[in-house]
Image (spheres, grey):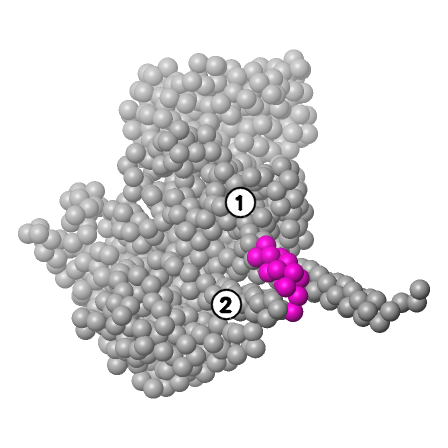
Amino acid sequence: MPPTSYDRRRTVFSVAISLVLLAITVATCSVLWRLRSETLSRQFELASLTARAMEDHLTQSLTVVERTLTLAGSDHNASQRLSFYLQQAPYLRSIAISGPSGHVVLSSNAANLGRQVARDDFMPQSTEPVAVLRSGPLTGGRDFADQARPGSKDSRGISFIPLALDVQQENGSWRGVLAALNTDYFLNFYSSHIPPPQGEVMLLRYDGSVLVRSANNFPGPLYSSMLHSRLAHSDTDRFEEMLADGHRTLTAYRASKSYPFIIVVRLDREFALSSWQHEAGIAVLVVSLSLLLLLGLATVYYLRFERLERIRQQDEEQLRIAAVAFESQEGIFVTDANNRILRVNRAFTRITGFSEQEAVGQTPRLLSSGKHLAPFYISMWQQLLASGTWCGEVWNRRKNGDIYPEWLTITAVKSAEATTSHYVATLTDITQRKQAEDEIRNLAFYDPLTRLPNRRLLLERLQRALGSVGRRNEGALLFIDLDNFKTLNDTLGHDMGDLLLQEVGRRLSHCVRDGDTVARLGGDEFVILLLRLGKDQREAAGYAQRLGERCRRALNETYDLAGHPYHSTPSIGVAMFADGQHNCDELMKRADLALYSAKAAGRNTVHFFDLQMQSSLSERASLESDLRQAVAQEQLQLHFQPQVNHHGAINGTEALLRWQHPTLGMLAPDKFITLAEETGLITLIGLWVLEQACDQLATWSQHSATADLTMSVNISARQLHHPDFAEQVQSILAQTGANPHQLMLEITESCLVDDFQASNNKMTALRQQGVRFALDDFGTGYSSLSYLKRLPLDQLKIDKSFVHGVLRDQNDATIVRTVISLANSLNLTVLAEGVESEEQHAFLAQHGCHCYQGYLFGHPQPIEALWEILATPTKQMKTTLLQA
């Protein structure tokens, strides 16, 4: 039977209904999927913005910490001011100063003193000092004094993050500063923004170790492989990951550009989709009812999804505001596009005194202090409109009328159409910080004793002055040093020395004009910077000379030091700006050279820089550079001078150093030994000489003709004062196999002036091993008889200056006879140096001298030439020596 119209209508209706059902189902699924995607996108954006906000907060907090540690490490009075610095960074529990060994030597927490802090635990790792804030691992305990195993909290759940910063001092040395960072401060901050059910915030080091985790019960590992691989390619990213237990998270991270930390924000995807799931369930119910009621419920269906759309837009609007205006320790207020205040936080009320009811509806002019003119605000708005942000110092007025400084940051919030919808401003009261900066600047640029500018401020003014010399006129630099100042400290004490320095500063300040600078570099060193002395260099030098003499006369006047009359004189060195060729360091060096010239001229005088000084200085610098390469390039050699007994037979030699310079030829020790001692190279060179001499002594022991010879080696004061000197000598003897009984170490009286007891202990330890000692150049120094009585000596060496005059100067002859008699009475052998004639030899032998050394018996010569003499039969020895 053919289909009826009813069937056709039913079919059409059924098809229509089916199409409507299919269309509604497809539309519903599509909309729900789109809303789900947008929800995930918003949550990803929330994670990214939260990570960025957390990283900004971390950078601001650590910047305060780094500045505080830098100031504490630069402060010479840190022992009294660490608690003051600690107040500037409320995130810290303690600030400490570490010594070279890593132990805490100063701390705001006395319990930390003496604690060992391992340098290798900090990142970035470095064996050398670095001026970068570094982080240690999470450490159990409240502070260094009760720290538990690194990487976990202690049994009480308390922990801290060790921080370290190396601060370079004015003299070029480094000072380690430590701090205990309070993890609770960051934990509370993170938990208040991402509560545990929603997700977690983690603070990591670059090595992946966790420092702070806002939700310890959040599922999943701390440092996933996906996070690790992403960090290897980008400092900031966001991604979805599945954890080992099946949980999915929306993860965003940011690696700090300034400090070795990583902020990771994880949002639980199920929690993020919970609101969508709830709304989606309602939507399905509405759609189901709509399908049952067909078109009758279509309006409800439409309105429901319209409501979902409005909720989505409101969520986005709230997200933009919340990403910038989250609650914090800083005062925050939010305005609309017309600059009307919509919201303030509690910190705003605490800082300004205005409650939320008093501020809402007003403009920020409510806080205006009247100290800023219109151009200031015009510039502020120009930058804000151009870049979307502005920050700087502003003077504002509290409700009670007090005017205070604050740090203000304003950020424009953009709508979806890229137009400005709101402004978010954060403000911080910096009153205490400004006061601290003023005090710290005073400490950083002025000498605390005399209140004069210190080296740093002097160098800044000198640099500016030298930059304007070519455009304006000449200037001068005067270095002033008090003669024999150490004597005052040693006799009357440092308190009297401080009184003298204060009076010297006052007198010098009265001698100069306004605009000139009187500075104290430290100790008894003062500097005067003279400016605007005229374009004529001769006229400028004349003024500098007259002022130098005026200062000299002023400082020559008698001082009244707490009732003690005292007389002091200065030495003054002058360098004109033209001398230094507009170079600050060069000018300082030349003024210092002029000062030394004044001292060498007898003190209490004024000397100008001489170009010959600079030439000598350049030659010395070049020679020092060459000397540093001499050992490595095998340019040093040993020559040996024979020592003979009263029979004329060689019984020993003295090892004498020579330098075969590549351009200057063979250099004797008097050309470079003093330089080696001043630069500290003498220790390395001395060990090389001792090793070569002992090696030669061991070689001689294998031949009958030389087996009984002794080897004399000169020992410098620096070598003798080295803590490990005795161990070094014993190690060389063991290494070379030399007989210690045939090694004679020669020391001078000057080696014993400083720390006599320590030197005596080292000599006694070596003497017990068989090593012998000779006192060289006896009679030219202090010639203290207590040295001879207390030291383990075997020999006295008469200086060649006495030997040369023994035949023509009665005083020299008397000294020689006395030294020989003294040595014989103390059972010490005597060796006379510098014997050049038979007459000198005869005189010495007549009065009981045992051994001799000098050109009469042989010049210092290489080992090959000496070996020919040593192989000569004894009866021919004297002739061979004379011919040599």
Our reading of the magenta stretch's main secondary structure is helix
User: Which kind of residue does numbered mark 1 sit on?
Assistant: Arg
Q: Residue at x 45, y 71 (%)?
A: 411
Tag 1, which secondary structure? strand
Counting other residues with Cα less than 10 Å from the Cα at mark 2, is it few (<14), some (14-19), or many (20 or more)? few
Residue 864 seen in render? yes
- Quarter of the figure with the C terminus: top right
Residue behind mark 2:
314
User: Which kind of residue does numbered mark 2 sit on?
Assistant: Gln
Q: Which residues are magenta?
A: 281-295
Q: Residue at x 70, y 64 (%)?
A: 24
Q: Which numbered circle lies on residue 205? A: 1
Q: Is residue 36 left or right of residue 161?
A: right
Q: Residue at x 40, y 85 (%)?
A: 378
The quarter holding residue 824 reads top left
Foreground residue among 30 and 125: 30
Q: Earlier in the sequence, mark 1 or mark 2?
A: 1
Q: Is residue 622 left or right of residue 807?
A: right
